[in-house]
Image: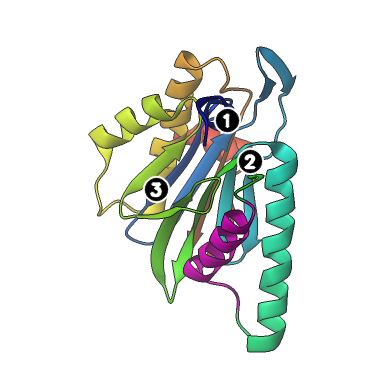
Amino acid sequence: MNKEFYEKIKSGTTTIGIICKDGVVMAADARATMDTFISSSEAVKVYCLNDNLGMTIAGGVGDAEYLVKLIKMQNELYRMSENKQLSPTSATSILSLILQENKMMPFMVQLLLGGLNNGKPELYNIDPVGGSTKESRFTSTGSGSLTALGYLEGIYDPSMEVQEAAKHAAYCLRIAMKRDSATGDGTKIVSITKKGFKEYTKEEIEKLLK
């Protein structure tokens, strides 16, 4: 992967994944950029794949949305044949194979995939050519990731529950927005627990920041 390609992948957003005592929290901003031009302030970068599985995207929007649709379709096929939904491990394996098979013309994406596997929280970081890393604490992608990771290193506690982690994710994105011009225009935060997939409302996020 050449340097120019990598720069395109890592630029333009901040996405966050945090492993908690009772689940996983994932978050991202809502700004989409084309070099220095802000192309959208309502970009969707966090997706629900099933009740126990979520994914954040960074990089090329078209490539990322294609992969979201594909893994949702795979989940439905698996649910119909096995009567259960894809786990984070299974979904990561499928995405890794797809990305590896296309490494000569790679998808311009960096993905975080998280959720519950038999009740246990899992979080994976997947690169454009299918390499995946299972994260035991937290991770971040995008041009604001260095700021986000610095904040998370200072506050992370494995005993924290999703509500506390969601608050830190909100603060993390707010800090990234102050330092990274490609991060901004809103915050989306979700949590995945045994109760299912929850997306925080704008009002709930504002309360987290008070």
Task: Give the mark nearest the N terminus, 1 or 3.
Answer: 1
| Mark 1 neighbour density, 10 Å: few (under 14) some (14–19) many (20 or more) | few
Three-letter residue code for mark 1: Phe
User: Which residue, as the protein is rendered here, is positioned at the far top?
Assistant: 36
Please give the residue where the numbered disc 3 appears in the rendered image: 18
Task: For the residues labelled 1 and 2, say whether their Cβ atoms are less than 8 Å apart.
Answer: no
Say which quarter of the image contains residue 86. Answer: bottom right
Residue 19 in the figure: left or right of residue 26: left
Please give the residue where the numbered disc 2 appears in the rendered image: 45
Magenta span dominant secondary structure: helix
x 72%, y 84%: residue: 80
x and y percentages locating residue 77 in the rendered image:
72, 77
- Cα distance between the residues tagged 1 and 3: 27 Å
x and y percentages locating residue 88 in the rendered image:
50, 65
Q: What element carries label 3?
A: strand
Residue 204 in the figure: left or right of residue 48: left
**Of marks 1 and 2, the one in the foreground:** 1
Please give the residue where the numbered disc 1 appears in the rendered image: 5
Task: Give the mark nearest the N terminus, 2 or 3.
Answer: 3
Say which quarter of the image contains residue 164. Answer: top left
Residue range corresponding to the magenta coloring: 85-102
Three-letter residue code for mark 2: Lys
Three-letter residue code for mark 3: Ile
